[in-house]
Image (spheres, rainbow, N blue to C red):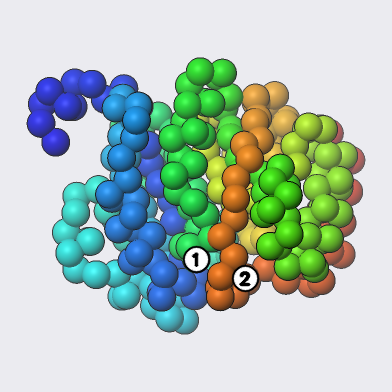
Amino acid sequence: MTKKMQSKIKYNIGIVIPCYMVSNSLNEIVEKLLKLSFINKAINISNIIIVDDCCPQHSYKSIKKNILKNSKVKSLKNKINLGVGGAVKTGYKFLLKKNINYVVKVDGDGQMDINHIENFVDHAISKNYQYVKGNRFYNFETIKKMPIIRLIGNAFLSFLNKFSSGYWDIFDPTNGFTLISKETLEKLELDKINNRFFFESDMLFRLGLIKARVRDIPIQAIYENEKSNLKIYKIIIPFLYFHLRNFLKR
């Protein structure tokens, strides 16, 4: 990047990619992020943090050498499996020490269209939203492609989250495609946020406590042959408990 190009950069974006059983798709995601260009030339991806959450596939070992040679890319490894939330928080804590403006969390399974990142950032900048997240329920075509058990489960969890977080206009709370401003991230007590699949829902609760401005953005999820680690039928009861606990704390 030339000095002239650097002078135009106003918003540095850090990317966090939590990794667990995604070794087959990880390199492709990172390569796409490195090649991603923005219409708004003031936006720049300055850091891509890959967090191996003690993955049985050893995701960090699957990363191509030429990718790791890129100064933007950093690979971290949790000593024990903390869960998706714990992995994201590892990346958050690392990026809090960097010169960035926003952090975007992207899954490593290829189900997120990274072209939405610029739209996320634009909403944060122009409307002063501190947290922007994807919502797969805006688009009927996307809903039709969603596995029925995931559709029903997410609808139920969305209504629970409205009660516990106070964000009545927010849907699809388990969606992990998110952007948060560094300033807002610094206000959150990260160690109190759930480490596992309740992470995104708990984030909304914690954001509600500090009155953060949150925005839903329509996105289209990509459903191919990837297997989700989140099993709706296994998390309904725990999520019901966590949402009730959070509601009573408000």
* Number of other residues with Cα within 10 Å of mark 1, as a class: few under 14, some 14 to 19, many 20 or more: many
Residue 103 to residue 221: above or below: above
Q: Secondary structure at mark 1?
A: loop
Judging from the image, what secondary structure is the residue with disc 2 in? loop
Can see residue 107? yes
Residue 205 shows up from this direction: no
| Left/right of residue 75 with respect to residue 1 in the rendered view | right
Which corner quadrant of the image does residue 58 belong to? bottom left
Instruction: Report how far apart the C-alphas of labels 1 and 2 lie in the structure.
Output: 8 Å
Residue 231, quarter of picture: bottom right
The residue at 50%/58% (across/down) is 107
Residue 204 in percent (x, y) is at 70, 39
Q: Which residue is mark 1?
A: 109
Q: Is residue 203 left or right of residue 120?
A: right
Q: Which mark is residue 214?
A: none
Amino acid type shown at disc 1: Asp
Q: Which residue is mark 2?
A: 228
Judging depth in this view, the residue of 188 and 66 nearest the camera is 66
User: Considering only order in the chain, which callout, 2 or 1, is on the residue closer to the N terminus?
Assistant: 1
Q: Residue furthest front?
A: 141
Q: Amino acid at mark 2?
A: Ser
**Where residue 124 appears, x then y in whole percent?**
52, 26
Tell me which residue sits at (49%, 33%) in the image.
Answer: 119
Q: Are the residues tagged 1 and 2 within 8 Å (C-beta)?
A: yes
Q: Nearer the viewer, residue 56 or 45?
A: 45
| Quadrant where the image shows the N terminus | top left
Observer-nearest of 69 and 221: 221
